Image (tube, rainbow, N blue to C red):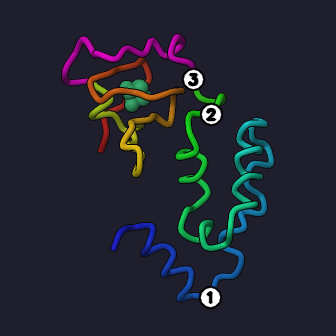
Amino acid sequence: MNYMRKYIKLLEDHHIEGSFSYDRAGINAPRAVQQAIEEFHNLPEEVKKNTPLPYYILGSGTPPYKMSREDSEYTDKSSDPSTTCGNCEFAYQKVISKKYICSQIRDEIQPPGWCNQWVKGK
Ligand code: SF4
């Protein structure tokens, strides 16, 4: 059982009401994040239950509050094979499209890529 399912089961087992309402989320967030949260609130309850808000925001694409490719000096090919998006903490692969995205910079990334935000993944 993955961590998200364990978390959901824990909430259900303890009858924690409103766990997926995120009433205070985004109060001081940039407008783009607030819009994503509004979209999330309009999703069917079953979808919200299986997609925690942080996953939804990250998976919804590469929103404008992330750093630009220019500012992060992103390149599709790292000059150092030991520091690539493929071993960076901030890289994610979308479940359905299989495309790689990053929690720090906008747009699609490539596993051999690199930027100045690189942090060794765990
Ligand atoms: S922070 Fe930079 S190096 Fe790390 S995954 Fe994102 S783009 Fe790649």
Question: Residue 97 location in percent, x, y?
Answer: 41, 44
Instruction: Please check the rendered image and state whether residue 115 is part of the magenta-colored stretch, yes or no.
Output: no
Q: Which residue is mark 2?
A: 63
Q: Residues within 10 Å of mark 3 (few under 14, many from 20)?
A: some
Sequence-first tag of 1 and 3: 1
Query: Do residues under tags 1 and 2 come within 8 Å of each other at their CB atoms?
Result: no
Q: Picture coordinates of residue 46 (x, y %)?
A: 61, 73
Query: Who's the residue at 71% across and 76% down the image?
Result: 18
Give me the C-alpha separation between circle 1 and circle 2: 34 Å
The 10 Å Cα crowd at callout 1, few under 14, some 14 to 19, many 20 or more, is few
Residue drawn at (60%, 67%) of the image: 47
Q: In screen coordinates, is 76 left or right of 14?
A: left
User: Mark 3: which amino acid?
Assistant: Met
The residue stretch that appears in magenta: 68-83
- The kind of residue on which mark 2 rests is Pro
Image side of residue 75 versus residue 8, left or right:
left
At 57% across and 87% down in the image, what residue appears?
A: 14
